Amino acid sequence: MKQEFLNYLTETNIKVLIFDKDGTLTDTSTLWFEPTILVLNELVNRNEMNLTNAEHDELFDRLGITETDIIENSVIASGTVRDMLEVLNHFRPIDIEENYDFVVHYFADYILSHPKKIQTLGDVKRALCVLKEKGFVIALVTNDSKLPAEAVLQVAGINELFDFIGTTDEFPSKPATDSLHAIQNRFGVSFNEMIYIGDST
């Protein structure tokens, strides 16, 4: 870790570092396509949605899924599991909460059984350890659900390094600031003493 960065944190009286996950700590670019296709097929079948071919194509289009990829800033790429289920609910009424539980467990199980699809961006564990040794509070705020997020952190070997993990199970998705207020209250810091490190806000 560059000394200039540590100096900046000290000079600006930063006490809490808030990290994004995907694209910041981990590269999950090859992770989500396959399990998303699999879980969507499971959802269609378990809810007996009986979609026509045209509806199936429209569903994937609305979610931002092509034949080979997930479109950037789409529902799947940037939204939450509930956002995905709301799109499905538009086609056929489904029990959002029951299906939510199914999806997050499905994703978590997939992640834990495919650890090679989780790559850290550099020596993340060492960097986080250095920051903790320097006395910084380490937080994570993500638009992921709790179970898949914790599965990614577990596979990456960094889950124990976070003092705070904020997911969409506890807080509204970014850019809502509810999770930041929770950090502020828990650790007794001001917004000026926190810094966000990520590729999205």
Image (tube, helix red, strand yellow):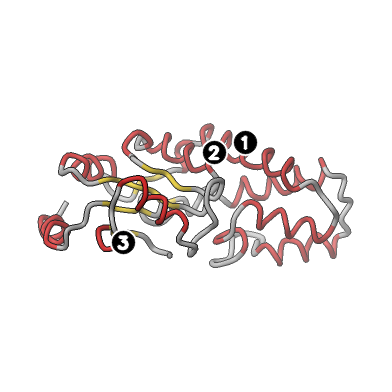
Position of residue 189 in the picture relative to residue 71 (left or right) = left
**Tags 3 and 1 touching, CB below 8 Å:** no
**In the figure, 61 relative to 153: above or below?**
below
Amino acid at dot 1: His
Q: Do tag 1 and tag 2 residues touch (Cβ < 8 Å)? A: yes
Q: Rounded to the nearest whole Å, what is the CA distance between mark 1 and mark 2? A: 7 Å
Determine which of the numbered discs, if any, sits on residue 83 in the image: none
Q: Which mark is residue 191?
A: 3
In the rendered image, which quarter is residue 162 located in?
top left
- Compute the Cα span from label 3 to label 1: 34 Å
Q: Nearer the viewer, residue 112 or 98?
A: 98
Left or right of 37: which side holds 8? left
Looking at numbered disc 3 in the image, what kind of residue is underneath it? Phe
> Residue at 86% across / 50% down in the picture?
49
Which structural element holds mark 1? helix
Q: Nearer the viewer, residue 146 or 44?
A: 146
* Amino acid marked by disc 2: Leu
- Mark 2, residues whose alpha carbon is within 10 Å: few (<14), some, or many (≥20)? some
Lateral position of residue 188 relative to residue 11, left or right: right
Q: Which residue is mark 2?
A: 147
What residue appears at the point 78 percent right and 66 percent down from the top-left corner?
58
Mark 1 or mark 3, which is nearer the start of the sequence? Answer: 1
Return the residue at label 1.
105
